Image: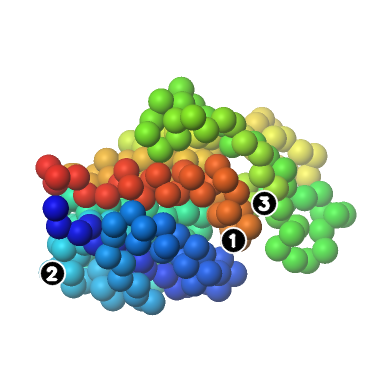
Amino acid sequence: MAQRRALVVRGGWEGHQPVKATELFIPFLQSSGYAVRVEESTEVYADAGEMAATDLVVQCVTMSQIASEQVAGLSAAVVAGTGFTGWHGGVVDSFRASSDYLHLVGGQFATHPGKEPCERLGGAEDNFLPYRVSLTELGREHAITAGIEDFDLVTEQYWVLHDDLIDVLATTTHPTQAWHPWHRPVTSPAIWTRRWGAGRVVVTTPGHSVDVLEHPSVRTVIERGMVWATRTASA
């Protein structure tokens, strides 16, 4: 069997520690039999030959911009069977101006509600809230999340705008608070998959910092998601 090839693409906003975050998972990929290539920009997405030979793309690029030929190359590769995955803003808050990228991923970060205004000190911790990630019925059976129980985190809780072509494995609910403008609890997908052509997409929204990525449930979901998303023999 030919060795599987993984492409790690990282960059964008440094607050999500794209180098440290991806370095956390490269040993897992290597020990799982992948040859790993690391790129510090999305230019590789426009290389049709390289993308056709790639079985899995792991992206950690928050915000930033992407050229039309690059997002077209990424989308074409996924349609042809290349897997695509990532976590937090590195995948679901990437390339906000690209509707084609948003269409591929199936969801877009909108906000992360914060603490009561009087408790805020002006740092990232202003948006760190205790919340629960709750498995769906599908999630309790899916290969990515089977055996994982609902778990609690204290970090950014992503509010995600999404379509109904995603298969939601876990959700999180934003409560109502006196200082927020919404009037009832809002449930967002926290972990999902998406079939796109012959390819598989996996999104995990927790992952603001390395300590969150090291949480046993978060890390397990991301690592299983990499394997599940990888190109299958039929693709």
Answer yes or no: is residue 159 visible.
no
Which class describes the residues within 10 Å of circle 3: few (<14), some (14-19), or many (20+)? many
Question: Residue at position x 70%, y 48% from top?
Answer: 154
Residue that label 1 marks: 210
Give the left or right position of residue 43, taking residue 86 as reference. Answer: left
Between label 1 and label 3, give the one nearer the viewer. Answer: 1
> Which residue is the extreme one toward the right?
118
- Give the mark nearest the N terminus, 1 or 3: 3
> Amino acid under label 1?
Val
Residue 153 position within the rendered picture, expressed as x and y whole percent measured from the top left:
66, 44
- Give the mark nearest the N terminus, 3 or 2: 2
Question: Residue at position x 54%, y 46% from top?
Answer: 218
Answer yes or no: is residue 40 visible.
yes
Which class describes the residues within 10 Å of circle 1: few (<14), some (14-19), or many (20+)? some
> Amino acid under label 3?
Thr
Q: SS of the residue at dot 3? A: strand
Residue that label 3 marks: 155
> Amino acid under label 2?
Gly
Give the left or right position of residue 209, taking residue 178 as reference. Answer: left
* The disc label shown at residue 49, or none: 2
Residue 51 position within the rendered picture, expressed as x and y whole percent measured from the top left:
19, 65
Seen in the picture, residue 15 relative to 151 is either above or below; the reply is below
Between label 1 and label 2, give the one nearer the viewer. Answer: 1
